[in-house]
Image: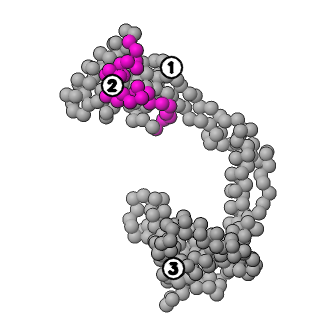
Amino acid sequence: MSIKVNDQIIPSWAIERQAQSLYEQVARGMPGKPREVIQLAAMDLAKERMIDQSLMAQESNRRKYQIDPEEVNKGMKRWMRENGGKKAIEKTKHPAIKDREDLRREILAQLRYNRLLEEESSCDKPTDQEAKEYYDNRPDLFTSEEMVSASHILKKASSDEEFKAAEEQIQAIRERLLGGEDFVKCVQEESDDGGNDGNLGTFGKGRMVPEFEKAAFSLDADQLSEPVKTQFGWHLIKLHEKYDPKLTPFEELKEKIIEYLHERKKDKVFESFLDGLKSEASIEEVSGI
């Protein structure tokens, strides 16, 4: 089914090609859904996007923006470079690009869109006070996570017998460490994961298997863990340092927050403009095209 937007027809084949190019993106947002449901959602999104593009193209043409041909040529070269070089047009799944002239029209339309977007999303930057209010209301966004730095000794195991033997070995190594032996020396001599002298670096929660994480985060600095069993075998963990969550000062983030809020504000302003175009447009499905 094709769509007529004012006097412009969006053919069904173009909508279908757009839906195909959007399929993977839509599928990522709908895990576990049947293929047919994802295809319908991709088709709906394709229709919505192409209606928006048509309205923007019509409005930008109505405003008769003058675009420098050299800017169009640069845009074409950049598109070719980013989409596979000389054979980019042959490979593309873009619904409106089948040859070089199509690409020229598409780049020209995009440059006009950009001019329209720039004009119709124009708005004042958020104030420092607005940025501070956002910062104060969302401390979770600006607080670093709790982290630790640690090293470990691992005795690998996969069968019941290996786990039993590994537990005995790791317990014996722990006794040696408590007796004063050097941790790095024991790593080098005994560990089945001795790379980087067993140093795991700094990590936050969710990076290690649950048993290991629970043990590591329960330790104090310079403390040696009890033997820890995971799917990999038996471990000893030595915690080097703990890093508590820390709120980044507002002054370090102010400009980034203002930039983020400004972009969000511009999006809302343009969405309102686009809604106005839609409310005044004639949009209908048509068959036979």
Q: Above or below — where is 252 with respect to 235?
A: below
Read off the residue under disc 3: 98
Q: Nearer the viewer, mark 3 or mark 1?
A: 3
Residue 61 percent coordinates (x, y): 71, 80
Kind of residue at disc 2: Ser
- Dot 3: element: loop
Kind of residue at disc 1: Ala
Q: Earlier in the sequence, mark 3 or mark 1?
A: 3
Closest to the observer: 186 or 80?
80
Residue at x 76%, y 68% (from the top left corner): 119
Closest to the observer: 147 or 72?
72
Read off the residue under disc 2: 191
Range shown magenta: 181-206
Whether residues under marks 3 and 2 lie with C-beta atoms below 8 angstroms apart, the answer is: no
Read off the residue under disc 1: 221
Residue at x 27%, y 20% (from the top left corner): 169
Q: Is residue 284 visible?
A: no
Q: Quadrant of residue 48?
A: bottom right
Residue 267 percent coordinates (x, y): 68, 61
Whether residues under marks 3 and 1 lie with C-beta atoms below 8 angstroms apart, the answer is: no
Task: Check the image and name the residue furthest to the left.
Answer: 161
Task: Check the image and name the residue furthest to the top.
Answer: 179
Residue 197 in magenta?
A: yes
Q: Earlier in the sequence, mark 3 or mark 2?
A: 3
Which disc is residue 255 wearing?
Answer: none
Dot 3, crowdedness within 10 Å: few (<14), some or many (≥20)?
A: some
Residue at x 47%, y 23% (from the top left corner): 239
Whole-angstrom CA distance, mark 1 to mark 2, is 21 Å
Residue 100 percent coordinates (x, y): 55, 79
Residue at x 69%, y 76% (from the top left corner): 69
